[in-house]
Image (spheres, grey):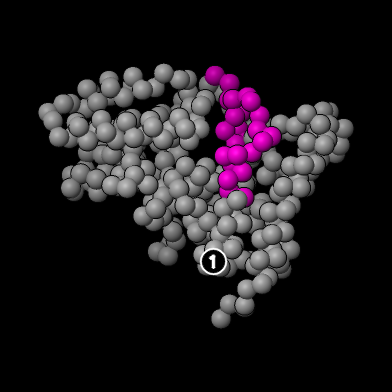
């Protein structure tokens, strides 16, 4: 990671990502489920720090909050993931020295200090600097930011189509403008509000079964009687499942409309100086 490359885990004071800590590794990983869970873990940890309770006591309390099953058994769901700021807008490691007046408590975690401090998800490598900044500037909260920044296909395919149509790579600084930011934010919200999402055990393009997973495929020819979709990577990333060609067409219209809106708004801006 270069000196000027954004830090994807904690990009700014308004959002962050906890996907590598197992944030979304539950069958029900909706916002309504995760947000109160994070609040309770944070409160438990704060009470631990203020008392003489042990980390084992904390783990016992937190384990009682996890009655649901995991998506993928071999991924560890860290019990020390919680809110790390007073406004409770950023999630992160409750053991980090920035949260504990300089004292590093990460040795008490499952993975340990060294691995937690050095780990970088694939998005650091596979997203371009422009794509990273576009996601950061277009996201306002921890839940959606984490879903989007870790979904490489969802991000890259959207901007590939836009860049090819414009004949240039977008300048992500323009996304700071309210109109463009609103458009890209609407696209990101499809990750949370997609009406064609499969009811199966899915996380984006991944299907889970016990300790195994595979990349999902949309059966275009077999189920819908058509060859495929030009938006296949985006549709798969959204966890899509279609019962008819009409449903697929409606989904494609939604994605194309987002792309068209972005391109039209981008072209209205003056040239970068």
Going 54% across and 63% down the picture, which residue do you hit?
178
Going 59% across and 29% down the picture, which residue do you hit?
202
* 212 vs 85: above or below: above
Going 41% across and 41% down the picture, which residue do you hit?
18
Residue 71 in view: no
- At numbered mark 1, what does the secondary structure look like: helix, strand or loop? loop
* 130 vs 196: above or below: below
* 26 vs 114: above or below: above
Q: Can you say which quadrant of the picture contains the N terminus? A: bottom left
Q: Residue pushed farthest left? A: 52
Q: Position of residue 148 (x, y in %)?
A: 54, 46
Going 43% across and 33% down the picture, which residue do you hit?
34
Q: Position of residue 50 (x, y in %)?
A: 14, 34
* 125 vs 95: above or below: below
Residue 206 in view: yes
Residue 60: name its quadrant. top left
Residue 103: name its quadrant. top left
Q: Nearer the viewer, residue 7 or 84?
A: 84
Q: Badge 1 is on which residue?
A: 177
Neighbourhood count class around disc 1 (C-alpha, 10 Å): few under 14, some 14–19, many 20 upward = few
Q: Position of residue 32 (x, y in %)?
A: 47, 32
Left or right position of 88 against 69: left
Q: Can you say which quadrant of the picture contains the C terminus? A: bottom right
Residue 195 highlighted magenta (yes or no) = yes
Q: Nearer the viewer, residue 46 or 18?
A: 46
Residue bounds of the magenta highlight: 187-210
């Amino acid at each position: 990671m270069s000196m000027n490359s954004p830090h994807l885990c904690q990009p700014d004071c308004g959002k962050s990502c906890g996907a590598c800590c197992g944030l979304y590794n539950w069958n029900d990983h909706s916002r309504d489920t995760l947000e109160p869970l994070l609040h309770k873990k944070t409160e438990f940890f704060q009470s631990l720090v203020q008392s003489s309770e042990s980390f084992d006591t904390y783990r016992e309390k937190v384990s009682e909050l996890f009655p649901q099953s995991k998506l993928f058994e071999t991924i560890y769901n860290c019990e020390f993931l919680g809110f790390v700021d007073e406004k409770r807008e950023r999630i992160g490691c409750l053991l980090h020295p920035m949260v504990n007046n300089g004292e590093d408590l990460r040795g008490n975690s499952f993975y340990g200090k060294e691995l937690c401090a050095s780990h970088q998800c694939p998005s650091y490598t596979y997203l371009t600097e422009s794509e990273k900044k576009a996601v950061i500037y277009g996201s306002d909260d921890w839940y959606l930011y984490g879903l989007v920044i870790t979904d490489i296909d969802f991000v890259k395919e959207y901007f590939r189509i836009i860049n090819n149509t414009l004949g240039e790579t977008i300048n992500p600084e323009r996304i700071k403008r309210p109109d463009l930011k609103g458009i890209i934010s609407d696209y990101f919200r499809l990750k949370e509000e997609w009406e064609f999402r499969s009811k199966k055990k899915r996380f984006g393009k991944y299907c889970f079964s016990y300790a195994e997973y595979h990349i999902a495929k949309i059966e275009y020819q077999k189920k819908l009687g058509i060859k495929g979709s030009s938006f296949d990577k985006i549709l798969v990333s959204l966890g899509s499942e279609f019962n008819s060609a009409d449903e697929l067409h409606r989904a494609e219209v939604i994605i194309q409309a987002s792309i068209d809106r972005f391109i039209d708004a981008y072209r209205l801006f003056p040239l970068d100086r």
